[in-house]
Image (cartoon, rainbow, N blue to C red):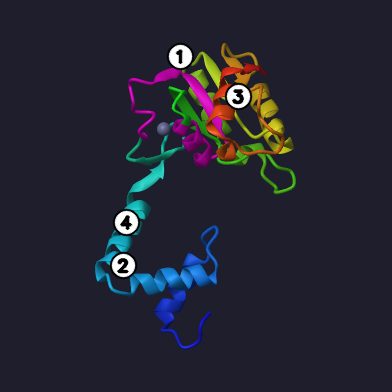
Amino acid sequence: MPAGLPPAVETLIAQLRKLPGVGEKTATRYVLHLLGRDPDAAVALREALAAVSDRVRPCTRCGFLAEGDLCGFCSDTSRDHSTICVVEGVGDLLAFEKVGEYRGAYHVLGGSVSALRGITPDRLRLAELVARVDAGGIREVIVTTGADAEGETTALYIRKVLEGRAVRVTRPATGMPMGSSIEYLDAVTLMRALRGRRDL
Ligand SMILES: [Zn+2]
């Protein structure tokens, strides 16, 4: 941290440094920019941050970001709500939406089962997924957790908890490189993977 900065500036730099990909140099540059020629920029940023932290919560149904109870996908009646695409995180969901081919519903798990990182199944939104299936009207659950060991473990766990229920559980088959997260796949690979899904 550059010496002699006012404490408030130091605090802001320290907070910005917690963001992914932001080091001290970048954080300092952001703050100097905000304190620079455009005084409205800091106010606008403050209001945007306040709005996000006050109003945005996980969707009560799928776990995506929502203002109010349901997110834009869950409240969109033009989508096919009989198909649920299970993703590890919000970033994966956004990757599917960028491709634009999938028109069903989503379910955000909030991670994958990991013995190494101490993430047990009860820490994911799995009970909520089962409850959605049990509520009826669901024909297919597409499990798109990562093709790494943790993602595969999570997929098998989902198959197990949905066993005996009248729902097809599928998994994208082709073009999913090992150890990759969906978020970083290109659109064509992602589309192929989704089209080539098979029963899990
Ligand atoms: Zn939702």
**Helix, strand or loop for disc 3:** helix
The residue shown at (49%, 24%) is 132
Residue behind mark 2: 42
Q: CA distance from mark 1 to mark 3?
A: 25 Å
Q: Residue furthest top?
A: 166
Given the image, on which type of amino acid does mark 1 rest?
Answer: Gly
* Left or right of residue 187: residue 171: right
Q: Residue at x 74, y 36 (%)?
A: 149
Query: Closer to us: mark 1 or mark 3?
Result: 3
Stretch of the chain drawn in magenta: 70-98
Label 1 lies in ligand 1 vicinity (Cβ under 8 Å): no
The quadrant holding residue 192 is: top right
Residue that numbered label 3 is attached to: 193
Q: Earlier in the sequence, mark 4 or mark 3?
A: 4
Q: CA distance from mark 4 to mark 3?
A: 36 Å
Return the residue at label 1. 137
Q: What amino acid is found at the position of numbered circle 2 in the picture?
A: Ala
Q: Earlier in the sequence, mark 4 or mark 1?
A: 4
* Depicted 127 relative to depicted 45: above or below: above
Marked residue nearer the N-terminal end (2 or 4): 2
| In-image side of 10 versus 154 (left or right) | left
- The quarter of the image that holds ligand 1 is top left
Where does residue 140 sit, x and y in percent of width and height? Answer: 54, 16
At label 3, counting other C-alpha atoms closer than 10 Å, the crowd grade (few under 14, some 14-19, many 20 or more) is some
